[in-house]
Amino acid sequence: MSQLTDGFGRSFPYLRLSLTEACNFRCSYCLPDGYHADGRPRFLAVDEIARLVRAFATLGMHKIRLTGGEPSLRKDLTQIIATVARVPGIRKVAITTNGTLLPRHLPDWHRAGLTALNVSVDSLQRERFHAITGHDRLPEILEGIGMAQALGLQSVKLNAVLLRGRNDDELPAWMEFLRERALSVRFIELMRTGDNGDYFQRHHLRADVLVEQLHAAGWSLRPRAADAGPAREYTHPGYRGSIGIIAPYSRDFCAGCNRLRVTARGDLRLCLFGDFGVALRPLLQSDADHDALLARITTQLGLKAAGHGLHQGRTGLTPHLASIGG
Ligand code: SAM
Ligand code: SF4
């Protein structure tokens, strides 16, 4: 039974751990000018990650998602996956990646214990993909996704950020893509962060427009599993794949929150858009601090707020999602 519960009856079986803030892409809504190192302390090392994950697993957490920045830029990623997968109690090890290194490394990650993969694909059109991400890499990313299916990973999901005027006409193409592929594509409504205010004004589009199109095309909402995250999943008998909608501005979004985050430098963040982080790194230096680490995590959980302040334009500490682990 998880001891990771908050004052609003939510439990947190799921940790998103950022491995780096660095990225090789320049997504227009996230890091439009690319990543620039800031000289602050280096990112968590493998032994620190092992202690962190052991603590969360002791508290009942069973799923870890490795994210970033771009987690595949870590040279020791295979070792990190193997370390996390060996922690007693951890049943699922997932990664969120832009997919550029899948063809090169996926078989190693899979052997190391990776069970689930999320790949960001903002457009199925090569030129648009290039324009949105700054890189003409769509073909190899699609190759990597095919590889993941052939390897038989438990779960393969694609993420597309919905952008007005950039990719909001692609739902029919995605449906075609899903006709014979047992994948889930998640459309994420663009979130406003500290750095992307103007972009948000120009390109934010409510995910409801997609929901209307899905209903019109005969897709229906799958009943929500008790432990489901914030995505609403739609299915259709004529298609092998499913379509998820992640709408952070919808009324009940925070009620379904089942995740905690730890940044690449070891700060516990209770909400993607929270106002504060709690340094766990000082307690990750020695196994002797295990109990103190458990106490710090559980105490902080009591402070998790009921919901984010995005509706009031409050974006908390987050300049862009690469800084916290999207
Ligand atoms: N680099 C990896 C990737 O792109 O998949 C992992 C980190 S990225 C921050 C995680 C996810 O957050 C990606 O699917 C990305 O498209 C999404 N994302 C980034 N900024 C966003 C924003 N402002 N609003 C909504 N989604 C965003
Ligand atoms: Fe990099 Fe992911 Fe941000 Fe794109 S969304 S810039 S791939 S961290």
Image (cartoon, rainbow, N blue to C red):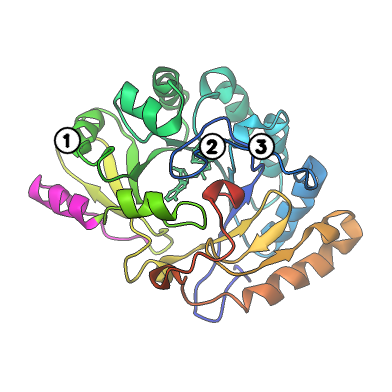
State left or right for residue 164 relative to residue 320.
Answer: left
Type of amino acid under label 3: Ile
Type of amino acid under label 2: Asp
> Where residue 271 is drawn, which disc sits there?
none
Q: Image quarter for residue 94?
A: top right
State left or right for residue 263 relative to residue 251.
Answer: right
Residue corresponding to mark 3: 81
| Residue 245 visible in the current orientation | no
Q: Which span of residues is magenta-colored?
A: 208-225
Type of amino acid under label 1: Pro
> Where residue 172 is drawn, which disc sits there?
1
Residue corresponding to mark 2: 33
Relative to 171, say whether 286 is above or below: below
Q: Quadrant of the N terminus?
A: bottom right
Q: What residue is drawn where x is 33% and y is 23%? A: 127
| Residue 32 visible in the current orientation | yes
State left or right for residue 21 relative to residue 152.
Answer: right
Q: Secondary structure at mark 2?
A: loop
